[in-house]
Image: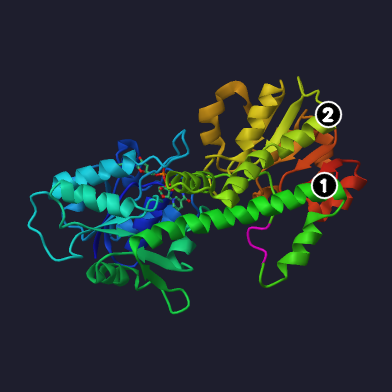
Amino acid sequence: MNVAVVGTGYVGLVTGTCLAETGNTVTCVDIKSEIVERLNAGHIHIYEPGLEELVQKNRAAGRLSFTTDLAAAAKNARLIFVAVPTPELPSGHVGMQYVNKVVDDIAALFRHATPGKAGDRVLVLKSTVPPGTNRMVTDRLAAAGCAHVSVASNPEFLKEGAAIEDFMVPDRVVVGVRHPAVGAALRELYQPYVTADRPLVEMTPESAEMTKYAANALLATKISFINEVADLCDLTGADINLVRKGIGHDQRIGFQFLAPGPGYGGSCFPKDVKGLIAVARRLGMTLRVAEAVDAANDVQKEVLLAKIHRHFDGKLAGKTFAVWGLAFKPKTDDIRESPALTLIDGLLVAGAKVKACDPQARANVEKIYKDTICYANDPMDALHGADALVLVTEWPEFRGPDFAEVKRRLKSPVIFDGRNLFAPNESAVRELGFSYYGIGRGN
Ligand SMILES: NC(=O)c1ccc[n+]([C@@H]2O[C@H](COP(=O)([O-])OP(=O)(O)OC[C@H]3O[C@@H](n4cnc5c(N)ncnc54)[C@H](O)[C@@H]3O)[C@@H](O)[C@H]2O)c1
């Protein structure tokens, strides 16, 4: 099938590349010419494991190309995917300016086109958009004389760091359509990716839009819940790692998204929980659970800093902290809403210095902090002369350091472990004389 993908970020680039991988002819569009130039040179501008190789393979096969020219990409495309940002506005509402721009550009392109049958040309909303957007976009196209372009909702559930696997072998594909022919076009496209166990679930656009928000809000709820239980463990002397085992083996509960940490970040959970709250408020409803999840996360993002303040008696001025992990989670370079940034801000406000290290996210962090903090490529180099090690993101390369060497390099043997990564080594760490603080492991 001939497909266009508008927006070549974490979602659009993965979508376009994975659709090309199963034989579709895909043209990806971005407004940023530097991104397109880089992609046309065979290099990707984000970090996602395995993606660069897959882009190169499909470019070489002639199935995948990149352009800034929406008209050229959309002209022969049966499906036009919209994967542009939907950022959080200061009010908490979802910013629709990028989506609206694409819709208006598409309307201008096809206003005078000969109308075909339903499903001949479909605008597929893959960006995460509030319930009601499909209707709004349909009306906007109709008002611009483009009622013959159908609108489908196809929210994306991929995880950064495992995005290719998630797209190629999805737990499910959700499509929201108003016309069976539009559903049929999407079924044809997704046929290579779905099975009876991993189905394509067809529903109304409103239900598809709500499904995406409900999924992210529920996952965020699990995280905020276990984080609060962990904070209570700190006060009661219980060990959250044992509590997690105790509850996770219950098949009704499971282990996923029940690892305590320094709060959830990324480009999705924070903004989607807030977006859902804002949608409900606009309709006169208060989402008490989602509001509590959001508020609990704000508190959790301060938890490491609070532990640091307590250990050093509030005297952080002039002290240096080695921060391991800057991305909001491992295997991505994405730092949007990362708890590491909240920590660094707090340390700098308190007059402390920061030596930061991350396998992939350094360049993105440097754009924000420039020379107000120091950077190290090697985690062990970040420790030289630091007063403590603070682990924020559980990259595999941080998992098993030589703790004796860590102690030699640090000015004082203190570890704040925001992911309980060193829990298995905790007794060895204590034997070496470290002060060790995890999350929910007792103070
Ligand atoms: N990142 C994730 O893990 C994830 C997962 C599921 C859903 N989503 C949703 O998918 C959407 C995209 O997220 P992302 O992380 O890929 O964003 P991103 O910021 O990484 O990429 C968006 C791209 O769109 C481009 N763009 C903006 N306006 C454009 C236009 N008019 N024409 C062409 N290109 C344009 C930008 O230049 C950018 O490269 C958001 O709604 C997000 O909530 C993201």
Q: Which residues are magenta?
A: 254-258
Label 1 CA crowd tier, 10 Å (few <14, some 14–19, many 20+): some
Nearer to the camera, 178 or 237: 178
Q: Reading the chain from its start, which is encountered first: label 1 or label 2?
A: 1
Question: Circle 1 is placed at which residue position?
Answer: 234
Q: Is residue 237 left or right of residue 297?
A: right
Nearer to the camera, 282 or 275: 282
Give the residue drawn at x 49%, y 68%: 171
Give the residue drawn at x 66%, y 67%: 254
Q: Is residue 350 left or right of residue 364?
A: right
Q: Is residue 255 magenta?
A: yes
Q: Amino acid at mark 1?
A: Asp
Identify the element where label 2 is drawn. loop
Q: Position of residue 209 (x, y in %)?
A: 40, 57
Q: Main secondary structure of the magenta part?
A: loop
Camera-nearest label, 1 or 2:
1
Quadrant (top left/top right/bottom left/bottom right) for the N terminus: bottom left
Q: Position of residue 242 (x, y in %)?
A: 81, 60
Q: Is residue 77 visible?
A: yes
Q: Is residue 79 magenta?
A: no
Q: Amino acid at mark 2?
A: Phe
Q: Quadrant of residue 200?
A: bottom left
Nearer to the camera, 332 or 213: 213
* Marks 1/2: CA–CA distance: 18 Å
Residue that lies at the very extreme toward the bottom in this rendered image = 196
Identify the element where label 1 is drawn. helix
Question: Circle 2 is placed at which residue position?
Answer: 312
Q: Is residue 65 visible?
A: no
In this rendering, the answer to whether 304 lies above or below 120 is above
